[in-house]
Image: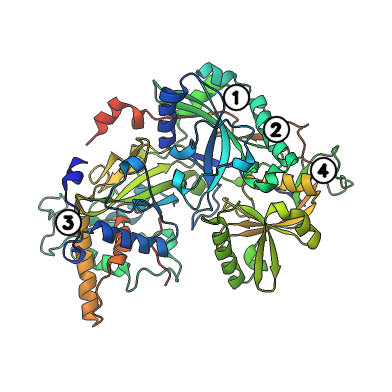
Amino acid sequence: MSPLQFSQFTCAVSTSFWHRLRDLKLDAFRLDDQKRQIWASYSLPSHDATNSPPIFSLGYEAFTDLAVPPAPLDVAHLAIPSAADGFPSSAIPVPGTIINTNTLDEFKSLDKRQALADAAQLVWDDIQSGAALACPDLLSRFLLVTFADLKKFKFYYWFAFPSFSIAPTPAPSATPPEASAGNPWTVTLHAPPRALGDDWSASDISSLVSAVKQHTLPPSSSTPVFFISRHADTIQFIPLSSASSYLASTTSPLLLFIDPSSLPTNPAWPLRNILALLRLSFSLSRIDVLAFRGLTSSLILPVTMSGLPSLSTPPTGWVPNAKGQLLPRLVDLSSAMDPRLLSASAV
Amino acid sequence: SVREQLTPIATKSSFLQTGTLTPEEFVRAGDFLVDKCPTWTWAAGAEAKRKGYLPNDKQFLITRKVPCRKRVWEIESEYGNESERLVSVDSATVANPAGEEVDPDSWIETHVGHVASHAAPVDAEIVDEGVDALAQRAAALSVQQTSAPDRPAEDEIPDIEEELEGEFGTGLDQPADAGTLSAQSAGFENSSNIIKTRTYDMSISYDNYYKTPRVFLAGFTPTGTPLTPQQIFEDVSSEHAHKTATVEQHPHERGGATFVGVHPCKHAEVMRRIVQMGEEQSEGQGEGKGMKVEWYMMIFLKFISSVLPTVDYDYTVSL
């Protein structure tokens, strides 16, 4: 029994996002610093990535609808962006909230703990209401706090991916905790992760890969997580919304999630809240997770859970900086934005 | 650019004679690339920047988050003096190391011995007879040696982190969480592979003045910060950085962000030579089928890999 640890995202914010934020701040938002809805995305690891953390991409296309407030999202009318909005067709869009403060002092003094708690509450509510079953994209909601210093071309930012606290794995001698609200949530591996190729034949894997591509790519685009039912040669995908009947029909449930991580033993962060949903909604305690990474490096993770996720322990999710400290990040784009520097380097 | 706008749109195929493409051929070669290498996709780009001579949804090609594990100076020092060859159409024109009398049409192929890490699988053969072989024939025409540049300082965590520490103190106090993979336990901190692996978004547009594809790069540091143009130049072979690679606005992307572009003024000439050698090769073997315009983008990407030797984008085809 070893704890299952989830890899946080490396957040790659393109310069065009900062250009877009600058323009919106100057032309549309002005001094209005209310929360706004944005979209980011992640993808399968690149074709030959090994041992790389998952990458989270934020670009010019982040602001799809400037009028939409971030919460609560109306699931029935959630317009998941597509290639037409500038999102790569192979990417999985993720909804999030941006708080762009007006001053550096406001950025500093913003109550980060409360902001994360609020963001986690949204995920919690979507699990309780069943909205997340219908639209698992809601589980990956993120929070971005920014301050744009437009005079100096400096952008302060901090990402958070809210999730419920996971307690340390109990010692083997301890009595296994029961699934009650009183016991903290633990997520462990009851066996080491193994390569998909250990369980599946090469031809089964290649038919899985093409089926996943058809299932997740436009025009039949669907959410990046579903159950798998295998009978003889046929692979059937079952959405989370049909989880009750699926879980009743099998003793060895298998969950597939699109895993942007290429680390040998660790899945990416989005799996956390997916497992929280399954634990809270179906009291699921054992499940095999197929961390789908494409043809060669997909993993099977034999997951065991105990206790229950809750908000009584403060949620986790702020992304540390490059040195591992819980501090915001700063990007200086003077070399890419300052007209004086640009004219000097123009050829 | 204005020059591009004033140039009439090519409709007559002449890639065998001149190495250039018509917009229609650009789309055909791009379709073939997207079909064979799924890491590449077509993109529509900004509506305001759309070119009428290309289909709305096929304005440019893009591949995202391509790993780049090393800086150019690392492989230039690995392969040393034997890593560069001057590709020249006229084998008589061999320049001296000082660079005088260099054939003006020549192109330096760098890092000849370097093999991109993804090129290893046996099933990933280059197009048909092998673009590799063609490129090597091109390279063999004449050879010039140049010396490797001085090794620049290693990337360091920028001062900006220190600046934030000063402003924000030691950071937020977030309760310990057993489910979070820390950088230490992932081994990122000790792994030079992770620390140095940059990622690039690379796109190919059509340049109507030069009538060739054109490459643009934007990239990120291992921690997700956008690379400055100066940093991107570290991944452009030293022969091309600042000369054929320059800071420019992307012809299709929105937002006014700057990219590093590889200037296409030599592309047609190099492509013409490679394509013609392919022609001669297939005639010599009695195949008589010649080069197909669909292969153009693969060959072009093979050739661009001499400008961007450490950017591991995919141009391989499994047949």
Numbered disc 1: what chain? B
Task: Report how far apart the C-alphas of labels 1 and 4 lie in the structure.
Answer: 33 Å
Q: Nearer the viewer, residue B246 or B60?
A: B60
Name the residue: 29% across, 45% down. Answer: B261
The disc placed on residue B170 is 1
Decide which of A141, B140 is in the foreground and name it.
A141
Residue type, numbered disc 2: Gln
In the picture of the structure, the residue carrying the numbered disc 4 is: A307
Crowdedness of circle 1 by 10 Å Cα count: few (<14), some, many (20+)?
A: few
Q: Which mark is residue A121?
A: 2
Could you tell me if residue B10 is visible in this image?
yes
What type is the residue that disc 1 sits on?
Answer: Thr
* First reached walking from the N terminus: tag 2 or tag 4: 2
Q: Is label 4 on the same chain as label 3?
A: no
**Residue at the location (73% across, 40% down)?**
A129
Label 1 vs label 2: CA separation? 27 Å
Instruction: State which chain disc 2 sits on.
Output: A
Q: Are discs 2 and 4 less than 8 Å apart at CB? A: no
Tell me residue A26's x, y (percent). 41, 23
Residues tagged 1 and 4 counted as in contact (Cβ below 8 A): no
Residue at the spot of label 3: B106
Residue at 72% from the left image edge and 55% from the top image edge: A242
Q: CA distance from mark 2 to mark 4?
A: 19 Å
Q: Do marks 3 and 1 share a subunit?
A: yes
Rendered location of residue A240, percent (x, y): 70, 52
